[in-house]
Amino acid sequence: MAKIADLTDEKAAEFGHTFIRWLTDDDPAGVARFFPNLDPHAINDRDASDIGRAVLEDLVAERFAE
């Protein structure tokens, strides 16, 4: 299983960009209305990396925290 320590900035950015597009384009949870000005194309790689790393770290921590 992959570990957060092995997550590169590039992979975190890729996930971050995908996550933002999922929120705004697919919008399965109906959250896009809360972020009407969120433009996935305006998110730079650094911000996307931060978003991706934060989301993945939270998911892993929640799943595996004792």
Image: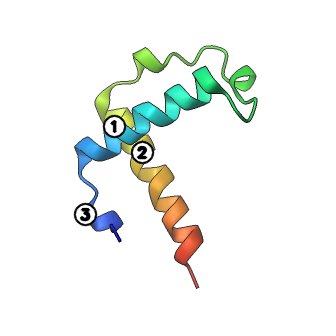
What is the quadrant of residue 51 in the picture? top left
In front: mark 1 or mark 2? Answer: 1
Which amino acid does the dot numbered 2 rest on? Answer: Gly
Where 14 falls versus 12 (above or below)? above
Asked whether the residues under the numbered discs 3 and 2 touch, taking CB atoms below 8 Å apart as contact, a structural biologist would say no
Task: Determine the CA span between mark 1 and mark 2.
Answer: 8 Å
Residue 14 is labelled as 1
Of helix, strand and loop, which one carries label 3? helix
* Residue under numbered circle 3: 6
Where 17 falls versus 61 (above or below)? above
Of helix, strand and loop, which one carries label 2? helix
Residue sitting at x 33%, y 38%: 13
Task: Determine the CA span between mark 3 and mark 2.
Answer: 13 Å
Asked whether the residues under the numbered discs 1 and 2 touch, taking CB atoms below 8 Å apart as contact, a structural biologist would say yes
The tag earlier along the polypeptide, 1 or 2, is 1
Residue 52 is labelled as 2
